[in-house]
Image (cartoon, helix red, strand yellow):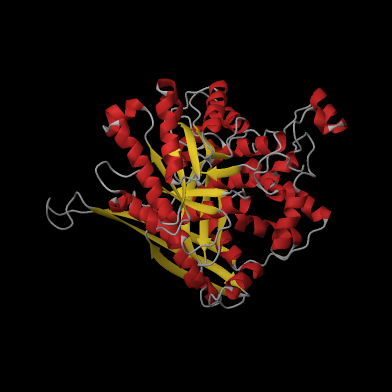
């Protein structure tokens, strides 16, 4: 569909505001991976975080400065402190010196907060807003100003709320975000107020909505309909309390329903895989009922619905699932996803015919029924494709492995070395395997069973495959799949590996967590030595030896 309405900037704040949700935790390296996933999706602005807040955020921005993005990266901060000049405020100085071309700063708007939180006069607050924006704009930054609790402020004193927007605009802000910080406003009010602000100021307007009343998406759409040209939200609706407005739902509504250009049309088809990919990195189970990208979003179960969809999908589907990268699920759906499989295989230099692609899909469905998920396990998926084509060449043939973990308690007197309050755990792994008719046995110690197995495996075949030294494990996550079985539950292990140039995921599922870890470990190493990835390392200048 050709867009006939104003383009809307998708501003993703998953890496900052989204991280305030319960259970949200990513390393700096993982955040870089999320930023690239958002960039690949075609997001216009990516709020990477708050560089002045803690060492991990500082590390993140150091990493991001070495990366290349098509999106504009935004660094987040606050208005200057009271009684401090903007140029002398440490937080603003960090933003000014940061590589990010966009700076987003938040400030107060609501009288309740001025009286009980910041304890500054209304005049001083306006000066803090104007000074901070003007300083950053003077430093060559594009500035987005987040007017915190804007709709609460408007209900209390519309004139002052508008004065805060005007102060930011006159200071040089490119956008002012009207924030429904408490998520309490309803769509009718959001639309009415946004239209009034739009009529009163020429500055670009954004909406930043939370979902406490279940209206985050609806409020964002109402704001756009009233004249906003930017939407701030998080992927999958991550965020504090009930979450932020869900960008994964907002984008297709804006683009497919309202005719706005948000993402390049070919990128919108990556929405589902991106949403699931980030869920998996966070060790979350993707919401099957999520609009557009959920596994059930286009699922039809028997009877009249299936008959209708078979006759014409429009009978029970509001959009083509392929438009957002999802797939229709019927009782018989073996054709779903062939194009995705063939594209993925082609990226790794493997050509698939329709029959092989269908076999891969069938195998994926079997494994997913057993607990596998391949969204963030691209390395294991690459290997699965090669196993189905008969092109898989395992590094070795396993005879056996054994892991011994021993906990030793101290026996000395309290306060002395080795006292009874101290202990140490030692882990040892022994691997026996075959390579080209030769038997290899190696034993290694580690700081846990996975580390010991990794060391033993590398020790056994490292001389045969010296390029293993380029590959290291960078992440390890375990998820319990059937918690009702307690310690006997099936576990899913997701393991990430990197060669310093590329990062990929591998997966293992088993009742025994060490066996699941072993499967993921082997996949991670074998995937790292596939011809396409080895060539990628070589092209990037990483020393390696071809297998």
Classify residue 404 as left or right of residue 460. Answer: left
Where is residue 292? Give x, y as percent: 67, 36
Identified at 49% across, 55% down, the residue is 32
Classify residue 243 as left or right of residue 438. Answer: left
In the image, 453 versus 406, the foreground residue is 453
Identified at 70% across, 44% down, the residue is 325
In the image, 342 versus 84, the foreground residue is 84
Single out the residue that lies furthest toward the right.
Answer: 311
> In the image, is residue 503 above or below residue 106?
below
Where is residue 451? Give x, y as percent: 43, 60
> In the image, is residue 322 above or below residue 501?
above
In the image, 431 versus 307, the foreground residue is 307
Q: Quadrant of residue 119?
A: top left
> In the image, is residue 505 above or below residue 146?
below
Where is residue 350? Give x, y as percent: 74, 64
**Picture mark count:** 0
């Amino acid at each position: 569909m050709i867009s006939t309405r104003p383009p809307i900037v998708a501003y993703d704040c998953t890496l900052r505001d989204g991280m305030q949700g319960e259970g949200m935790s990513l390393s700096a390296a993982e955040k870089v991976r999320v930023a690239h996933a958002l960039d690949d999706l075609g997001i216009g602005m990516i709020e990477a975080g708050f560089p002045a807040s803690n060492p991990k955020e500082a590390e993140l921005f150091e990493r991001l400065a070495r990366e290349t993005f098509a999106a504009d990266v935004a660094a987040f901060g606050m208005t200057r402190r009271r009684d401090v000049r903007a140029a002398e405020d440490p937080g603003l100085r960090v933003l000014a010196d940061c590589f990010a071309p966009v700076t987003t700063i938040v400030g107060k708007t609501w009288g309740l907060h001025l009286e009980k939180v910041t304890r500054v006069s209304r005049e001083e607050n306006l000066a803090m807003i104007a000074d901070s924006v003007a300083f950053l704009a003077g430093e060559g930054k594009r500035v987005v100003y987040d007017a915190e609790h804007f709709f609460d402020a408007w209900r209390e004193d519309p004139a002052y709320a508008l004065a805060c927007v005007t102060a930011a605009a006159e200071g040089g802000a490119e956008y002012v975000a009207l924030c429904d910080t408490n998520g309490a406003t309803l769509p009718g009010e959001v639309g009415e107020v946004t239209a009034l602000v739009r009529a009163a100021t020429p500055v670009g307007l954004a909406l930043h909505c939370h979902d406490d009343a279940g209206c985050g998406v609806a409020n964002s759409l109402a704001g756009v309909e009233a004249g906003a040209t930017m939407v701030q939200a998080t992927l999958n609706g991550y965020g504090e309390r009930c979450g932020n407005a869900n960008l994964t739902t907002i984008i297709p509504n804006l683009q497919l329903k309202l005719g706005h250009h948000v993402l390049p049309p070919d990128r919108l088809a990556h929405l589902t895989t991106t949403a699931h990919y980030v869920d998996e990195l966070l060790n979350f189970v993707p919401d099957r009922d999520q609009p557009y990208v959920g596994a059930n979003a286009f699922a039809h179960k028997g009877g009249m619905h299936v008959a209708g969809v078979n006759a014409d999908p429009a009978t029970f589907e509001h959009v083509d699932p392929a438009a957002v990268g999802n797939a229709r699920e019927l009782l018989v759906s073996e054709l779903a996803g062939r194009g995705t499989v063939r594209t993925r295989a082609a990226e790794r230099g493997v050509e698939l015919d329709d029959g092989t692609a269908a076999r891969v899909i069938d195998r994926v469905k079997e494994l997913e029924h057993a607990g596998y998920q391949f969204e963030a396990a691209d390395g294991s998926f690459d290997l699965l494709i090669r196993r189905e084509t008969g092109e898989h060449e395992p590094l070795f043939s396993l005879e056996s492995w054994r892991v011994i973990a021993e906990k030793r308690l101290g026996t000395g007197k309290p306060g002395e070395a080795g006292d009874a309050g101290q202990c140490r755990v030692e882990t040892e792994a022994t691997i026996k395997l075959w390579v080209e008719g030769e038997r290899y046995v190696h034993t290694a110690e580690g700081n846990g069973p996975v580390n010991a197995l990794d060391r033993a495996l590398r020790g056994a075949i490292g001389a045969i495959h010296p390029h293993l030294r380029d590959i290291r494990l960078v992440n390890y996550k375990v998820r319990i799949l059937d918690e009702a079985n307690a310690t006997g539950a099936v576990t899913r292990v997701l393991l990430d590996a990197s060669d310093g140039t590329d990062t990929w995921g591998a997966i293992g599922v088993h009742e025994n967590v060490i066996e699941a870890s072993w499967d993921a470990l082997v996949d991670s190493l074998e995937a790292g030595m596939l011809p396409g990835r080895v060539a990628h390392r070589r092209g990037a200048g990483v020393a390696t030896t071809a297998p």
